[in-house]
Image (cartoon, rainbow, N blue to C red):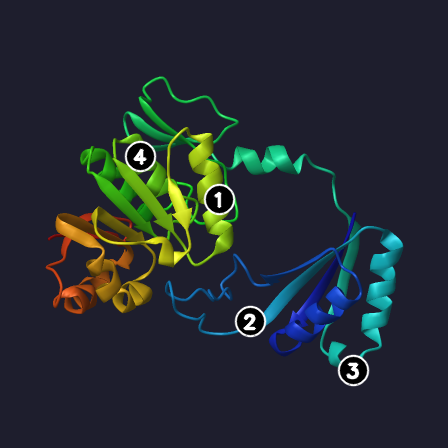
Amino acid sequence: MFELNLMCPEARVEQVSDALEALDALSVSVEDADAQTDAERALFGEPGMPAPKAGWQRSRVLALFGAESAAKEAAQLLRVQHFFQGCEVLAISPVIEQDWVRLTQSQFAPVEITPTFWIVPTWHEPPQAAVQVIRLDPGLAFGTGTHPTTRMCLRWIAAHPDVGSVLDYGCGSGILAIGAALFGASAVVGVDIDPAAVQATQHNASANGVQVTAGLPERAQGGYDLVVANILATPLKVLAPLLCSHVAHSGQLLLAGILERQAEELMQAYQPFCRLAIADVEDGWILMSAAF
């Protein structure tokens, strides 16, 4: 495996990246060439919002090729293209072989939800203190227990066992639905607009020995004792009438994916249906709940 390392100005990054893909690069990635210097500029926007700019002023474009000859040929072809003006070939270098599976696994350790409730990847042994364990590996769908919003939802679920029927709206990996089932929910339904998330939920529920009915959003029917949605503030506001319509009499609503500064706008969006309150806070994110 060989890496072609290029320096490109912001205006050339997209064209160069497209050309590398057309030249059969195995992968193409873009990095801030000024990272970890005084000239570094973050491009990350708020959750649910676009990044402030499409690229960095100076970008390092990295392309992987299976053979050195392919990387050299790609560099030669790029040099004579008009859109390569202002760009530079920095290096072509071999990529050190690594055990990528082991390296990836090393980045995911067991996650503590409570002292006795843990999320544990399949390649780790559960901690001795763990009484309840969700076995979950990183996959295509959101939810491994590492994000504050997921942890807050699971902490709430652990503190409210035997809640009755549960709807996990936007189930992702199924982690919240599985947690509800482990803590005694009588029936659990997980729905998501992404078919890959539905498959992930089904697989993960089976791997944890719990019963979760997973499907697309239309699978949610009637009222539930607990409706939980860990999405983002904007879709949560749009979904307010729908989510509240699925909460049974004397039921509970649990919302996450909300920044602390977004609390008031969520309260206003849900005011016609219920009275939201902040139930938990972690790392700038909040968990909101309402009783019906």
Q: Position of residue 103 (x, y in %)?
A: 60, 36
| Dot 1 crowding, Cα within 10 Å, few <14, some 14–19, many 20+ | many
**Element type where label 3 sits in the image:** helix
Which label was assigned to residue 200? Answer: 1
CA–CA distance between discs 3 and 4? 59 Å
The numbered mark, 2 or 3, whose residue comes first in the sequence reads 2
- Could you say which is closer to the camera, residue 258 or residue 193? 193
Which label was assigned to residue 55? Answer: 2
CA–CA distance between discs 2 and 3? 20 Å
The label nearer to you, 3 versus 1, is 1
CA–CA distance between discs 4 and 1? 16 Å
Quickly name the residue at label 3: 82
Establish if 174 lies above or below 32.
above
Establish if 229 lies above or below 152.
below
What residue type is disc 3 on? His
Q: Residue at x 85, y 71 (%)?
A: 77
The numbered mark, 2 or 1, whose residue comes first in the sequence reads 2
Quickly name the residue at label 4: 181
Any part of residue 42 in sight = yes
Which label was assigned to residue 87? Answer: none
The numbered mark, 3 or 4, whose residue comes first in the sequence reads 3
